[in-house]
Amino acid sequence: MSRRILAVIAVLAVALAILTALAVRRGVLGPTDQSAAVGGPFQLVDTSGRTVDQDVLKGKWSVVFFGFTHCPDICPTTLFEMGQVEPLLGAEAAKVQTVLISVDPQRDTVEQMRAYVANPAFPKRLIGLTGTLAQVDVAAKAYRVFYQKSGEGPDYQVNHAAYSYLMNPKGRLACVLPYELTPEQTAAKIRTAMQAGPAADHC
């Protein structure tokens, strides 16, 4: 297959991921469709080396973000801003966790993830998950997240979706959190979902 065809396929995949996110954000998909479209079973490994599954989302509001530790901009910015969201939520912050799922399992070992999520500027309630490439693929497909390795050599990058998902305490989608939101806007959306209750499907 020629490089031109591969490039076209990659562009179409990115466009599909963006359109799906916009559809959810703008309400083109109804609440039931959103919940069915995003989320599902997965098995990954946390920073203690323990295998976890989708139940890690149960019982708390979870901001789920797919990224990687060598990411130069989107990932650290997203996590830094979530670190700012926590104090804005006050006492309610104890009910919220941020979940980073690696899209670069080749470099994001358990040890690498453990060191990365320990950044004091990131959320205090931050869970880092990695796994085999097959395990990451399953999680990414469940969450309709596109990602693709870019470049060669040890300094390659990974193109990936920039938005996050707010999942309710039942592990179902409440809403999409766009990358461009300020910490204040993100905190407001989380509060709105909390006020709607544990089964919230909007915010």
Image (tube, grey):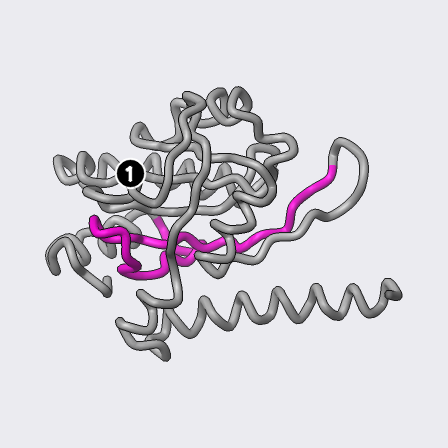
Q: Is residue 23 above or below residue 163?
A: below
Q: In which quadrant will I find the N terminus?
A: bottom right
Which residue position holds label 1? Answer: 97
**Residue 26 included in the magenta stretch of the image:** no
Quarter assignment of residue 45? top left
> Is 128 on the left or on the right of 57, as rendered?
right
* Secondary structure state at the residue bearing disc 1: strand
**Residue 181 included in the magenta stretch of the image:** yes
> Is 2 on the left or on the right of 187, as rendered?
right
Towards the viewer: 126 or 2: 2
User: What is the magenta range?
Assistant: 156-182
Q: Residue at x 44, y 57 (%)?
A: 143
Quarter assignment of residue 59? top left
Q: Residue 44: where, in percent of width, then height?
A: 45, 37
Q: Residue at x 41, y 58 (%)?
A: 178
Q: Is residue 53 above or below residue 188?
A: above
The crowd level at tag 1 (other Cα within 10 Å; few <14, some 14-19, many 20+) is many
